[in-house]
Structure formats: C-alpha cells, structure tokens
Amino acid sequence: MCLIARYLEERGIATLVVGTALDIVKFGWPPRAVFMDFPLGHGGGPLFAAEQQLAIAREAMGVLESLSEPGQIVNLSQAWPDGDAWKSGASDESADDVRSPRDLTPRYQLEADRLLAEQHAAAAAGD
C-alpha cells in the first residue's frame, strides 16, 4: 500500500494510508498515514459498525491537509469496541488465528527495493 501511495503521489494524486500495523506503516514510509491500533484487516473499522466507520473516515480526512511531510503518521482517536481483548486472541497460539511474531527486520522483494528504502530513510534522517 505504501509503495502504491508513493507512486500515486509522484503523479500528483494525494493519498492517505490507513494502517493498523504501525511497524509496517513506518517501514513503508507512505507520504501520509493515519494509524489505529485495530486488528489487522480492520482499517475501516469493525464489521457492520457504520457509525464508527464513518467516524474513522471523517477523522482521517480531517487530518489529511495537516500532513505535509512525507512519513508523517497520525494516531487516530478511534478505539476498538471491545478494547484490547483482540490482542490476546491474535497472539494465542492455541487459537485459530495463529500469527508469527513480528520482527523489525524489513523484507524486500528486490534488491532495488531495499536500496530505495535505505535512500528514503537516509533522506528522512537528514543524511
């Protein structure tokens, strides 16, 4: 998603990435992004929760113009309806939803992708 956002931005189309995995969004370095600590795949909000889905869209669009520097990520004020209970289920190895633990090592499909990511990181760090 972050690569697509950068591609579109380079062509003059404004984008906003809505992420639920902060480490992935940070490593992807999108032009603009918002984050919610929600289960993966639920960036639009909980299923059938139309009011919260609309609130997420409104809050995300409300911060769009304030994000002027590439790589900025704003935490939205939205909360998952059942609190953080979903986190224990996501890491419970006896549950149906078994996920591998995340690590901080970025993975790249091509060597050119790794080089580009390193260039962007160096530019963001002011090197």
Image (cartoon, rainbow, N blue to C red):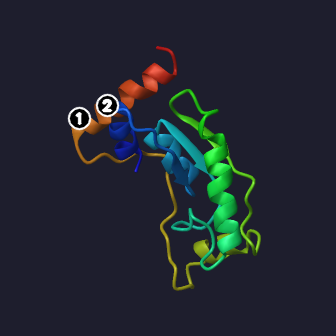
Camera-nearest residue between 123 and 89: 123
- Classify residue 31 as left or right of residue 12: right
* Secondary structure type for disc 2: helix
Q: Position of residue 17 (x, y in %)?
A: 50, 48
Give the residue number, with chain letter if any, for mark 2: 116
Q: Nearer the viewer, residue 99 or 64?
A: 64
Q: Secondary structure at mark 1?
A: helix
Whole-number angstrom distance, CA of label 2 to CA of label 1:
6 Å
Q: Is residue 36 visible?
A: no
Q: Residue at x 48, y 67 (%)?
A: 100
* Dots 2, 1 in contact, CB < 8 A: yes
Q: Is residue 1 above or below residue 28?
A: below
The answer to which quarter of the image holds residue 94 is bottom right
- On the image, the x and y values in percent for residue 34 come to 60, 47
Mark seen at residue 87: none
Q: Which residue is mark 1?
A: 112
Outermost residue, top side: 127
Q: What amino acid is found at the position of numbered circle 2 in the picture?
A: Leu
- The kind of residue on which mark 1 rests is Ala
